[in-house]
Image (cartoon, grey):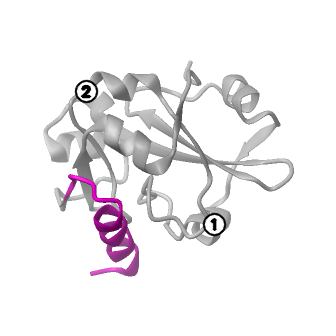
Amino acid sequence: MSKSLARVARAIEDLGLEAEILNPGPSRTAEQAAEACGCALDQIVKSLIFQGDAGRIYLFLTAGGNRLDGDKAAELAGEPLQRADAATVRAQTGFAIGGVAPIGHLNPPVIFADPRLTEFERVFAAAGTPNHVFGIAPTALIAACGAMVAPFTA
């Protein structure tokens, strides 16, 4: 088991979450993950990492079919944002792009969640690798990672 996957499994256990880690196959994109999990595209939780001008890291948990609106995201963050590069994502979260989980970060970011995710009984989020996801109730996920539900999509 990879260190990243083990960290997510440990976070699930430590947080007392009812979540199941799955290895459905390549899940690097929301479309691949939805196909692999046999679910609707919007049931996939995309983890989008941005960095503020002052260096603060923000994670936007977005429904698979939605697109982040940069102006709305910056307004929520209270500062201009830019997409974090791969090295920053790895250093701050401990995960590589394509496998960024909403929990188990090395340095927990400020987290916002797309309201669309709350419309489902179960969603699937990256579990630390591009091939692993975990299924969970969205309300449990949002509570566990301390996300603020707010509109930031186009």
Where residue 118 sits in the image (x, y, percent)? 35, 26
Where residue 148 sits in the image (x, y, percent)? 55, 34
- Residues marked 2 and 1 touching at CB (< 8 Å): no
Q: Which residue is mark 1?
A: 92
Q: Quadrant of the C terminus?
A: top right
Q: Which residue is at a point 41% across and 49% down the rendered structure image?
A: 144
Where residue 146 sits in the image (x, y, percent)? 51, 45
| Quarter of image, res 30 | top left
Q: Nearer the viewer, residue 94 or 10?
A: 10
Disc ID at residue 120:
2
Q: Main secondary structure of the magenta part?
A: helix
137 to 75, vertically: above or below = below
Q: Nearer the viewer, residue 56 or 12?
A: 12
Q: Identify the amino acid type marked 1.
A: Gln
152 to 64, vertically: above or below = above
- Relative to 33, is 46 on the left or the right? right
87 to 65, vertically: above or below = below
Tag 1: Cα neighbours inside 10 Å, few (<14), some, or many (≥20)? Answer: some
Residue stretch in magenta: 1-20
- Relative to 80, is 63 on the left or the right? left
Q: CA distance from mark 2 to mark 1?
A: 29 Å
